[in-house]
Image (spheres, rainbow, N blue to C red):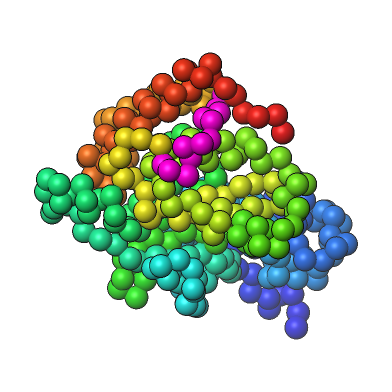
């Protein structure tokens, strides 16, 4: 087969355009940089490089557009959580990535009074995952995978990027492994704790805390049971000291109710948004009362 007849997908041009600067993170050990590759190796890379490498070539906007419009070529059942989300494979312009699709939700907008409070404080909704992602992005917290809302097989839900090559904390705990010791995670854990208080996530567990060792990153997933109306610290964090930088404290102070309403009102109720502000005030009050403790030294 001659190279003239090779159909190169659109995504391949991103690889070629960035060939002079991008270090290759692919599956063959002798890959060091694209500058020295012969054409046959370049074509191999285009079609076989890992999703991890592919993601380095996409901007956040491009990734969001991909998740929202790419063709679903495979759907698999999972045994994750109570609502059993689907693992899906998406493909567009020659690029293939995996994601999670969650469609379980509960109506809360047409309930009133005490019944509204009860429903919100028990609801498991995919919209909460989208709200958590948008709030994290606003705060420049990049620890939640890219998340969009779209329809798959006429069913509306949330699509969240699959975290490739990740380690689930549950597996670390059960195996009593020390794998995580190679990376400094204390700062990221402190940020996670602050964020979980802010959105009142009382469902943080060993199965929704992921780690990738190649970039020493903690990933927070599964926020479908967050955004309760409660104005206190979630039970799992009551014994934890709130630690954060002055910069994160400033980000919290800058959260405004009108900005949050514009950002989140399509996903959660106004009362839930107001509860975010109440918990923000609580976080700052506790932190300042304890002499503003910063992150623990790694």
Magenta stretch bounds: 234-245
Give the total of numbered labels.
0
Residue 78's x, y, as percent? 49, 74
Q: Main secondary structure of the magenta part?
A: loop
Residue under the image location 59 percent in, 24 percent down: 294
Q: Residue furthest front?
A: 239
Residue 128's x, y, as percent? 35, 51
Residue 91's x, y, as percent? 52, 70
Residue under the image location 20 percent in, 47 percent down: 117
Is 228 drawn above or below residue 37 in the view shown? above
Nearest the viewer among 134 and 122 is 122
The answer to whether residue 64 is seen in the rendering is no
Residue under the image location 60 percent in, 39 percent down: 188
Residue under the image location 32 percent in, 35 percent down: 231
Is 288 drawn above or below residue 207 in the view shown? above
Image-quadrant location for residue 97: bottom right
Image-quadrant location for residue 258: top left
Q: Is residue 244 magenta?
A: yes
Task: Quadrant for the C terminus, please.
Answer: top right
Q: Is residue 237 magenta?
A: yes
């Amino acid at each position: 087969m001659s190279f003239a007849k090779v159909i190169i997908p659109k995504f391949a041009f991103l690889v070629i355009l960035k060939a002079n600067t991008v270090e290759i993170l692919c599956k063959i050990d002798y890959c060091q940089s694209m500058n020295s590759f012969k054409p046959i190796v370049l074509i191999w890379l285009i079609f076989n490089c890992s999703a991890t490498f592919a993601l380095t070539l996409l901007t956040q906007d491009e990734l969001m557009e991909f998740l929202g419009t790419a063709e679903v070529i495979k759907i698999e059942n999972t045994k994750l959580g109570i609502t059993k989300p689907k693992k899906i494979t998406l493909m567009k312009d020659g690029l293939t990535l995996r994601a999670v699709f969650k469609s379980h939700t509960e109506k809360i907008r047409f309930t009133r009074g005490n019944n509204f409070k009860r429903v919100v404080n028990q609801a498991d909704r995919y919209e909460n995952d989208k709200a958590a992602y948008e709030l994290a992005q606003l705060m420049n917290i990049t620890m939640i995978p890219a998340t969009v809302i779209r329809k798959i097989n006429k069913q509306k839900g949330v699509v969240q990027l699959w975290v490739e090559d990740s380690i689930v904390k549950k597996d670390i705990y059960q195996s009593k492994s020390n794998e995580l010791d190679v990376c400094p995670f204390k700062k990221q854990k402190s940020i996670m704790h602050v964020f979980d208080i802010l959105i009142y996530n009382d469902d943080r567990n060993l199965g929704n805390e992921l780690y990738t060792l190649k970039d020493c990153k903690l990933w927070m997933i599964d926020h479908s049971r967050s955004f309760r109306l409660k104005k206190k610290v979630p039970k799992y964090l009551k014994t934890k000291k709130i630690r954060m930088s002055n910069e994160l404290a400033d980000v919290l102070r800058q959260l405004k109710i009108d900005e949050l309403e514009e950002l989140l009102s399509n996903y959660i109720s106004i009362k839930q948004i107001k509860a975010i502000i109440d918990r923000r005030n609580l976080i700052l009050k506790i932190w300042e009362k304890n002499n503003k403790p910063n992150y623990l030294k790694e």
